[in-house]
């Protein structure tokens, strides 16, 4: 039975401090009185850090110039639910998009492909995209192809770099899982390790997507996947986030968000486009100096 010490109970004021902090830094909107939920998720940090209450915890986070504890805090309240080949209809559209990208790159005489997986968690989405790029056969030989995953959870990034998974990561694939596992993974007991040929061009980095420095050095992105992130953000944060993506994505690039999400009436920086019944978003090129 969980015993909550008196000095560990989160007050309404303390909850307000932490709720506002998570919104100001990451755009995540915590609705309603979620004090018990927040307490359950982060109370162990007080014990680890030797703090008596959540005001001290808030002050500890604010005093940490490295922001290490801030990232630890947010990692405990975000959802890391992911698996290979999630939302397959969108992935089918992605495969079609690759053909268009190859055509445009040939005209421009470019051989550089950049794909982003935002809120990449433990890497299943980024590696799925890399498998699809590999299977397309469109970007071989002299192509500079890179998939970049960005997340706020350092533990998730560590797992992504390990590229080692269990059967739970293939739960959406039904009968297709066995064929993909045999082709792309090495099995060790109950673990499945992605073959090195599919990890060398995939990079993961810790970053806050509301901060532009999270995207430093990436250059223009051809495709950005950012699924099931916006549903947790306030409209104000979505506008700020969209501004970052607008500058990051190429003029001919594609933005793919979750099937239950929409940017319509939330920003004019991106315009919806239908492809095989799936909505993707394109840069609104009519906007200057947004």
Image (tube, rainbow, N blue to C red):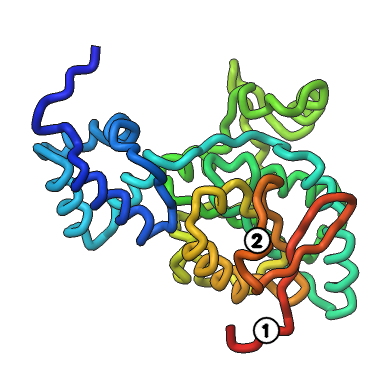
Q: Earlier in the sequence, mark 2 or mark 1?
A: 2
Few, some or many C-alpha atoms within 10 Å of disc 1 (few <14, some 14-19, many ≥20)? few
User: Which residue bears the numbered disc 2?
Assistant: 263
Q: Which residue is drawn at 84% across and 58% down?
A: 274
Asked if 288 appears above or below 229 in the picture, the reply is below
**SS for tag 2?**
loop
Is residue 197 at all visible to an observer of this figure? no
Asked if 262 appears above or below 81 in the picture, the reply is below
| 24 horizontally vs 58: left or right | right
Tell me the quadrant of the picture where the N terminus can be found. Answer: top left
How many tags in the picture?
Answer: 2
Is residue 262 at all visible to an observer of this figure? yes
* Rendered image quadrant of residue 178: top right
Q: Residue at x 67, y 37 (%)?
A: 195
| 252 horizontally vs 214: left or right | right
**Which residue appears farthest toward the top when viewing the image?**
1
The reply to whether dot 2 and dot 1 touch (C-beta < 8 Å) is no
Q: Where residue 176 appears, x then y in whole percent?
A: 81, 26
The numbered dot on residue 287 is: 1
| 40 horizontally vs 136: left or right | left
Asked if 108 appears above or below 172 in the picture, the reply is below
* Foreground residue among 195 and 39: 39
Q: Where residue 38 appears, x then y in whole percent?
A: 32, 37
Q: Which residue is drawn at 65% across and 65% down?
A: 265
Asked if 57 appears above or below 210 in the picture, the reply is above
**SS for tag 1?**
loop
Tell me the quadrant of the picture where the C terminus can be found. Answer: bottom right
């Amino acid at each position: 039975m969980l015993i909550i010490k008196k000095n560990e109970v989160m007050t309404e004021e303390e909850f307000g401090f932490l709720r506002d902090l998570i919104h100001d830094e990451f755009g995540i909107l915590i609705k309603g009185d979620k004090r018990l939920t927040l307490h359950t998720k982060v109370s162990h940090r007080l014990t680890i850090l030797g703090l008596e209450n959540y005001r001290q915890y808030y002050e500890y986070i604010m005093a940490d110039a490295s922001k290490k504890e801030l990232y630890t805090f947010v990692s405990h309240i975000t959802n890391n639910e992911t698996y290979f080949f999630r939302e397959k209809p969108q992935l089918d559209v992605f495969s079609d998009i690759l053909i268009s990208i190859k055509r445009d790159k040939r005209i421009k005489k470019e051989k550089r492909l950049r794909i982003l997986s935002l809120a990449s968690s433990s890497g299943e989405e980024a590696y799925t995209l890399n498998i699809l790029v590999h299977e397309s056969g469109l970007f071989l030989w002299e192509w500079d192809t890179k998939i970049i995953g960005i997340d706020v959870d350092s533990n998730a990034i560590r797992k992504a770099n390990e590229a080692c998974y269990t059967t739970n990561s293939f739960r959406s694939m039904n009968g297709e899982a066995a064929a993909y596992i045999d082709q792309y993974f090495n099995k060790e007991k109950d673990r499945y390790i992605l073959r090195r040929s599919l990890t060398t061009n995939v990079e993961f980095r810790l970053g806050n997507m509301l901060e532009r420095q999270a995207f430093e050095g990436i250059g223009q992105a051809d495709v950005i996947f950012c699924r099931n992130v916006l549903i947790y953000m306030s409209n104000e944060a979505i506008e700020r986030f969209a501004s970052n993506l607008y500058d990051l994505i190429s003029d001919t690039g594609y933005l793919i968000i979750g099937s239950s999400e929409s940017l319509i009436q939330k920003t004019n920086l991106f315009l919806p486009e239908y492809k095989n019944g799936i909505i993707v978003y394109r840069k609104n090129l009519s906007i200057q100096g947004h």
